[in-house]
Image (cartoon, coloured by chain):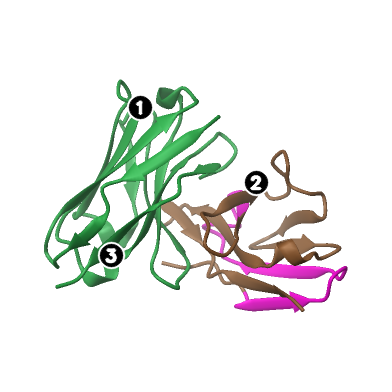
Amino acid sequence: EVQLVESGGGLVQPGGSLRLSCAASGFTFSFYWMTWVRQAPGKGLEWVANIKPDGSETYYVDSVKGRFTISRDNAQNSLYLQMNSLRAEDTAVYYCARDTGSAMAWYWGQGTLVTVSS
Amino acid sequence: QSVLTQPPSASGTPGQRVTISCSGSSSNIGSNIVNWYQQLPGTAPKLLMYSNSQRPSGVPDRFSGSKSGTSASLAISGLQSEDEADYYCAAWDDRLKGHVFGTGTKVTVL
């Protein structure tokens, strides 16, 4: 069974940093593109970033370029999102998701809440 | 960057057919596949439809998807109370070089 468990969320001040982790199990992690999606309170879904199986390619939504970095450790079956220079508008539940050849975000974690506030 | 437009709400009585539209452009829906996601209240989203019209295992066949040009649609036939949820379309955008989600549609069963 595919399992994705996010961690690392919490309260951070504007301008601060946070690193999210996603522990993957139940599949061969190194075979799949992985994705981060966020959802601000009461708002819709927003794709944040994704990363190729070997980590050689990454893509980001414009609003986080230069501030967020997606990475992975295939030996540890883990996905990460390093978030720097955080802003109030980054407040959201952040979901880790596994892609397939047919679809972005076939499997989802339960999410971790990031709150940016002073 | 919600470049895919959906109606904010849709509703129907049990057993009715409801259709949700998703309007995009040549750089996203017009040249890439569309996926649909269902988000039940208080839960993580779930993939509902992939490659425009394919259902993952376990998704009831009352859900169907289609795509034509720069628009896509999701239909729910025989609406049931458990279908009350938020629905989002998504596609890769060649110009933005990223995935984009639709604005989301809240389906209410009257």
Q: What residue type is labelled 2?
A: Tyr
Chain of the residue on which disc 1 is drawn? A
Q: What element carries label 1?
A: loop
In the displayed structure, would residue A4 be above or below residue B42? above
Circle 2 sits on which residue? B50
Chain A appears in which tint?
green
In the displayed structure, would residue B10 be above or below residue A104? below
On residue A77, the disc is: 1
Taking the spot 49% from the left edge, 25% from the top edge, the residue there is A27
Is disc 1 in the same subunit as disc 2?
no
- Of labels 1 and 3, earlier in sequence is 1
Q: Quadrant of residue B83?
A: bottom right
Chain of the residue on which disc 3 is drawn? A
Q: Which of B9 and A109 is in front in this view?
A: A109
Q: Residues within 10 Å of mark 2 (few under 14, many from 20)?
A: many
Taking the spot 88% from the left edge, 68% from the top edge, the residue there is B15
In the displayed structure, would residue A35 be above or below residue B93? above
Mark 1 in CB contact with mark 2 (< 8 angstroms): no
Q: Which of marks 1 and 2 is in front?
A: 1
First to last magenta residue range:
B7-36
Q: Quadrant of residue B67?
A: bottom right
Circle 3 sits on which residue? A90
Q: In which quarter of the image is residue A52?
A: top left
Question: Where's residue B30, x and y in %?
Answer: 61, 57
Is disc 1 in the same subunit as disc 3?
yes
Question: Where's residue A84, x and y in %?
Answer: 16, 55
Chain B appears in which tint?
brown
Q: What residue type is labelled 3?
A: Asp
